[in-house]
Image: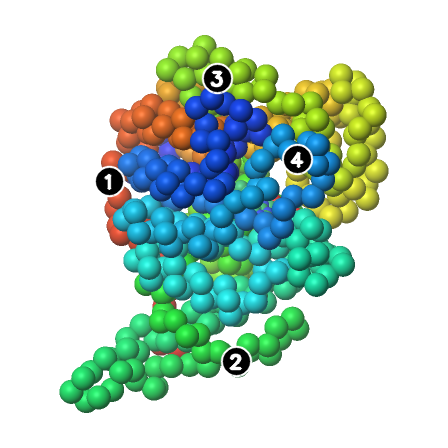
Amino acid sequence: MNQDRRGEKIKLGAFFHPTGNHVAAWLHPEAQIDAGANFRHYAQITQTAERGKFDLMFVADAVAVRDGNLEALSRWPQYMAFFDPLTLLPALAAVTSRIGLVATATTSYNEPYHIARKFASLDLISDGRAGWNVVTSSNLSEAYNFGREAHFEHGERYDRAAEFVEIVQGLWDSWEDDAFVRDRTAARYFDPAKLHSLNHKGKHFSVRGPLNVARPPQGYPVLFQAGSSEVGRELAARFAEGVFTPQHSLQSAQDFYRDLKRRMKTYGRLPEALKIMPGLNAIVGRTAKEAEEKHRFLQSKIHPEVGIELLSNALGGFDLTGYDIDGPLPEIPPQYGELSGQTSLRNVIRWGREEGLTIRQCYERFAGARGQRTLKGSPIEIADDMENWFRAYGVDGFLVHPAYLPGGLDDFVDLVIPELQSRGLFRSEYEGTTLRENLGLPRPPNRYTR
Ligand SMILES: Cc1cc2nc3c(=O)[nH]c(=O)nc-3n(C[C@H](O)[C@H](O)[C@H](O)COP(=O)(O)O)c2cc1C
């Protein structure tokens, strides 16, 4: 193993899908069956991740119930009924003290003022641990809940997103850091010269400001991005400080890593201002055999109806019912997503074409990890692989997707973390108190005092 990146540490996030990442997670006898409606469960797993010294926990979001074949959906509860992240995270802030709290919020079905206000509040409530995963939404079902008959087109979504983020950052600068003098003697609460209106009038939004929340402790909550398309990467290069991405081989991870860090130069940003954290669906056993058995057990629980539904979704809605599931993946017309630039669709088509996987094999691969890379093995095997990807500049860290919860996370924290720590690759104590400090990111100065 080469010794590149000496002294640097791996960054780790924990992705909490309501019942775990595996599509059949809820059928595991040790999974928390009512996860999406059980706050105690989220408190417990977030505390476990904090015990493991994870940089952050992350919850995804969509502002709609998933649409689709109800028969299949009724066997697959993920993201059907779950907590609103920006209600959940402040509650989690109260039962943790160091771990970063990161949530998705969409720029397509929110107003910038709302988002600036909520994440600034979360950052204050958590003493500087908030992070926002900026997404543009990919489900048409979300449009129907917000007075629209159609979703914004892919390019337009990202155009809105860029303007949206600029506004949110502008609103976070409304108050200078020392605006609140709170001086009883002089009877002056804040210095009026340190309050600024944004007066934004742009292509998609008009926002006067200022924000009615003080400047967040981190200056700006940490921005994350998870789009891997051309425009998604541009948005990430311009604004993101953390990127979540599915990467299935070291080569593709290295290409993605180099590409994104190179793009940052255009925006005058340094490569270390962005941490790239590909997904890792780690299935850990005390031995490789035990990990294999755990994986096989979960795979055996995938209902074919769910597998087909999931694969159809990944293929932009292409209906696979009626095809032999043990036969080849049919030709998928390009309008089903290649045009919309969906990464998951490209991946599935590659598995079907280049690797010759059948429909069942495709959905097993996809369903098992839900589009992320699966890594099975003993703690040493998993740590070896993570170390290799890290030292070879494929990643700055990983977003760990426990297959089922809480057990999959317990395994990672109890078995893999100590192995990474003993190699000097992962912290034994948090370096700082804010998410920024732990990720090694600078605190952005206020634009009015720069
Ligand atoms: C780890 C990860 C988490 C994501 N979380 C969300 C989410 O919570 N909500 C959402 O609408 N999209 C989410 N996405 C989808 C991305 O934001 C993005 O739309 C998708 O990867 C397709 O890329 P593109 O938008 O650049 O075409 C996530 C993607 C990844 C890889």
Q: Ligand 1 closer than 8 Å to the CB at disc 1?
A: no
Q: How crowded is mark 3: few (under 14 residues within 10 Å), some or many (20 or more)?
A: some
Where is residue 249? Give x, y as percent: 56, 29
Marks 2 and 3 sit apart, C-alpha to C-alpha, by: 54 Å
Which one is earlier in the sequence, the residue at label 4 or at label 3?
A: 4
Q: In this view, does 313 lie to the left or right of 54?
A: right
Query: Is residue 183 or residue 70 the one in the foreground?
Result: 70
The residue wearing badge 3 is: 294
Dot 2: element: loop
| Foreground: disc 1 or disc 3 | 3
Q: Do the residues labelled 1 and 3 touch (CB within 8 Å)?
A: no
Dot 1: element: loop
Q: Which quadrant of the figure contains the C terminus? A: bottom left
Q: In which quarter of the image is residue 251?
A: top right
Marks 1 and 2 sit apart, C-alpha to C-alpha, by: 42 Å
Identified by mark 3, the residue type is: Lys
- Please give the name of the residue rendered at 30% of the width and 46% of the height, measured from the top-left corner: 96
Q: How crowded is mark 1: few (under 14 residues within 10 Å), some or many (20 or more)?
A: few
Q: How crowded is mark 4: few (under 14 residues within 10 Å), some or many (20 or more)?
A: some
Which one is earlier in the sequence, the residue at label 4 or at label 2?
A: 4
Dot 4: element: helix
The mark tally for this picture is 4
Identified by mark 4, the residue type is: Leu
Marks 1 and 4 sit apart, C-alpha to C-alpha, by: 42 Å
- Please give the name of the residue rendered at 48% of the width and 45% of the height, measured from the top-left corner: 59
Which one is earlier in the sequence, the residue at label 2 or at label 3?
A: 2
Where is residue 19? Give x, y as percent: 50, 34
The residue wearing badge 2 is: 208
